[in-house]
Amino acid sequence: MPPRDDEERRLSARLQTLIGAGSLSGLASLREEAAGRLGTGHEVVLAVEHALELRRDCGRTPMESLPIWLELRERSATSLPPDSGTAVAIRARCRRQLLGCGRPGDLDELVELCRRETDPDARIDLALALRDRARFDDSTEDLPGALAVAAEEVRRRGADHVAVTAARRAQIEVLLALGRTEPDSAAQARELAAEMVDDPDGEMPGSRALLAEALLLTGRTVEAGRVARLAYALDAGTFDPARPLLVVARTEAAIQARATAQEALRQRQAFFPPESHYVVEARRLVEELFHC
Amino acid sequence: MSFVLHELRETVASRWRRELAGPQTSVRTHWATKVGYYQAVEALLAGGADAAELSWTDVVAEVRPHGSRTTFFGVAGRHARKPLLGAYLAAQRNDVARCFERDSAPEMLIDETKVWSYWPHRVGWTDELFRAGETHAAVECLLRVLLDWAVRERELAAALDHAPPVCAIEDLVVLRAGQTTATEAARILREGIRLRLADGYGTDGVLHLLRREFRPAPGPAPGNRPLARAIDQLMRNSRTPSEQRRQAVAMMRDAIAVLESVPE
């Protein structure tokens, strides 16, 4: 048995405490201290960097975060075995930045990365990447496969509520994409999103936006507007807070709808790359509303 | 939090550990002997030994450079010198002592080994705990640190039906300031370790489940006061941006439509 390294254990416990306490300055100091004691390639040091950059992501756009995570991924690949928990977590965060950037090239790269990964979270990312790629050309070719992957992950994750919710969210996202042409998928998305909103353990951020979209797809326009307005007010500060505005715009009268869609476009342009599906979707809606 | 930190420095386990690993030479020698036995237990469990079947002869054979019947029963069992269980009983903390009363000396040794193994994690936890701010965050930090330990020491953590290190039970009782008994704390921590190791939950999944245990009991219904306050604030503040006012009006109209459609 290798000798116990109490120093490493103490640093790891400090990391867990700082994550629980949500202390950004504490993580920054710990990073310096741990690197000095253990060396920059040590797993605990890279785990601290993972936690630190995760916190810093809150104040950055995906475009700003992506190079930081790519660099961290490179460093972790040279120092850690591929199946170490920290290396897996860093690669997962890197994939999330590609998903957040949402440009066609990012999504193509993400699909390839996910297909090479053995981490179960990569399967969720694969389903989401396939769904997002279909937004550019309205194709549905990849969506049945994406749905199967997400549904399988929901089943496989057993009772871990947090893990199941992540898979369930991906399942709903794919159902919403399929629901544009398949009423049954839209109805199923509505049912699952309503369950997420009514979760007795507390609603997951962003689930109201999914419900609003599902309600709109199934023709319950008034209710969709109502849920989307609440989602916009309640989900401020979450990823893509402008998403419910696209539903609100579709439920409003022409002049107000244009203003709402323009606001959604303005917010998305400020956060996402111009070629991303986020901006493309909002711009399409603005153009549609101005031409009708 | 500073008072809690003071209390955590003075728990029974802290004082016991401080005395044993302290400067007094005779006690330090005993501590070194104990550590030799803890390392032997850790190695046996990591090598696949069944905690329930572990005998004193197995442990003695594993001790390096060598163990003996005399030193084994000097560090473990009812007649051991300075056992942690004895420290709890002497401090009249029978509530905590009851959580780890065992029939056999090897099982008692496993309980102490858990505390010894967990201790560096506890030190790291207390070093940063001043940043936690509130009790619920401090509890969350404790759970995170405990789960981190359990993942690093899977076999030891799983031994004796996933019993937590007794010092963590005592710490949780301190943090909860009388709202959680030692028996409840032991059950919650055991459940956390079991879910993380045996049932394949991630750390976030375990924390999500355990947070229910610490949720305050629902208070009386707040009535319409929070709503009235928000409306009052909106109406009084003439600097509220027009877009925000418009959205507020839309949400209130939505609420009126829903509330008026509900039958009396």
Image: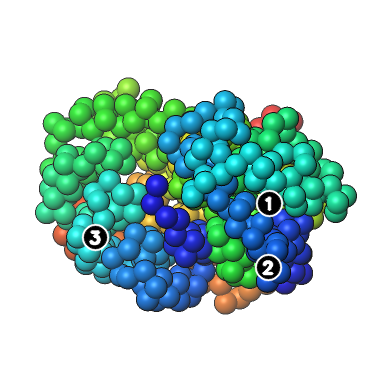
Q: Position of residue A231 (x, y in %)?
A: 48, 50
Task: Inspect the image, locate mark 1, and give the three-letter code of the amino acid beneath it.
Answer: Cys
Q: Earlier in the sequence, mark 1 or mark 2?
A: 2
Secondary structure beneath dot 2 equals: helix
Q: Is residue B158 left or right of residue B111?
A: left
Please state the chain letter of the residue tagged with numbered disc 1 in the rendered image. B
* Residue at 27%, 46% in the rendered image: A83
Specify the subunit that label 3 lies on: A
Same subunit: marks 3 and 1: no
Which dot marks residue B167?
1
Measuring 37% from the left and 76% from the top, which residue is drawn there?
A36
Position of residue B250 in the picture relative to residue A131 (left or right) = right
Closer to the eye: label 3 or 2 = 2
How packed mark 1 is, by other alpha carbons closer than 10 Å (few <14, some 14-19, many 20 or more), is: many
Would residue A43 appear left or right of B73 to someone viewing this image?
Answer: left
Q: Whole-Å distance between the Cαs marked 1 and 2?
A: 25 Å
Asked if both marks, 3 and 2, belong to the same chain, the answer given is: no
Q: Which residue is mark 3?
A: A79
Q: Which residue is mark 2?
A: B25
Q: Secondary structure at mark 3?
A: helix
Q: Position of residue A161 (x, y in %)?
A: 49, 36
- Res. B177 visible in picture: yes
Q: Are marks 1 and 2 on the same chain?
A: yes
Question: Residue B49: which disc?
Answer: none
Q: Is residue A204 visible?
A: no
Q: Between B49 and A64, which is closer to the camera in this rendering?
A: B49
Chain for numbered disc 2: B
- SS of the residue at dot 1? helix
Between B149 and A274, the one nearer to me in the picture: B149
